[in-house]
Image (tube, helix red, strand yellow):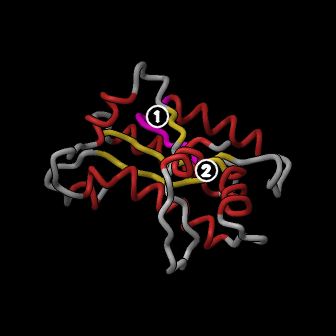
């Protein structure tokens, strides 16, 4: 509340959390719900990590994710879904990392978040805000879940870059 009151022109809120359980699913959705009650006219954007059965460490992750998605339908205006299984697949198949660390996964997430929010952070011809983004991307209020894509994909700390062809970039964007 203090941070919001200190703002000159509060657009909305961005929350990053996991839907698999622990603090992100329960506390994260409760926080989103309370913020929505307190600031109903402000935009709520979330970056939500969706659990995967292949890389799951707890058996209740599907239940936590289901309950969390229900809260996101009600209280979020834009939800950018980040697939945990896809992160591991990208690290192993595209970046050729045999045992990806949380740092490697977080690097990919931060690159995607940076790309999504660049029009909010910097001035320019394609400058936007959270509300304009929602107006252009959300066809119906309950259909506000987006899958993110990013290319070119490079490993964390990689200093040598190579030029990618258009087919390679397209394959990185749409490879399941």
Quarter residue 39 falls in: top left
Q: Which range is magenta?
A: 74-82
Q: Please report contact status of discs 1 and 2: CB closer than 8 Å, yes or no.
A: no
Task: Tell me if residue 170 can be seen.
Answer: yes
Q: Residue at x 21, y 44 (%)?
A: 126
What residue is shown with label 2?
Answer: 49
Number of dots carrying numbers: 2
| Residue 117 drawn in magenta | no
Which quadrant of the figure contains the C terminus?
top right
Closer to viewer: mark 1 or mark 2: 2
| Residue 80 drawn in magenta | yes
Quarter residue 78 falls in: top left
Residue 125: give x, y in percent of width and height: 16, 46
Q: Compared with residue 77, is residue 105 higher up or lower down, i.e. above or below?
A: below
Q: Nearer the viewer, residue 64 or 143?
A: 143
What residue is shown with label 1?
Answer: 75
The crowd level at tag 2 (other Cα within 10 Å; few <14, some 14-19, many 20+) is many
Q: Compared with residue 159, is residue 95 higher up or lower down, i.e. above or below?
A: above
Task: Tell me if residue 30 can be seen.
Answer: no
Q: Residue at x 31, y 37 (%)?
A: 133
Q: Residue at x 75, y 47 (%)?
A: 52
Q: Label 2's element?
A: strand
């Amino acid at each position: 509340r203090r941070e919001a009151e200190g703002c000159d022109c509060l657009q909305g809120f961005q929350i990053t959390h996991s839907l698999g359980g622990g603090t992100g699913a329960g506390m994260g959705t409760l926080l989103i719900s309370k913020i929505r009650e307190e600031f109903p006219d402000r935009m709520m954007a979330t970056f939500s990590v969706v659990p995967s059965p292949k890389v799951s460490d707890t058996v209740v992750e599907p239940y936590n994710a289901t309950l969390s998605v229900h809260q996101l339908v009600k209280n979020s205006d834009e939800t950018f879904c980040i697939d945990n299984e896809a992160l591991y697949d990208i690290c192993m198949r595209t970046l050729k990392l045999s045992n990806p660390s949380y740092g490697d996964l977080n690097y990919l997430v931060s690159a995607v978040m940076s790309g999504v929010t660049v029009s909010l952070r910097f001035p320019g011809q394609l400058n936007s805000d959270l509300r304009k983004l929602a107006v252009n991307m959300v066809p119906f209020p309950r259909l506000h879940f987006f899958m993110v894509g990013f290319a070119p994909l490079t490993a964390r700390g990689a200093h040598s870059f190579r030029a990618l062809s258009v087919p390679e970039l397209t394959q990185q964007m749409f490879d399941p």
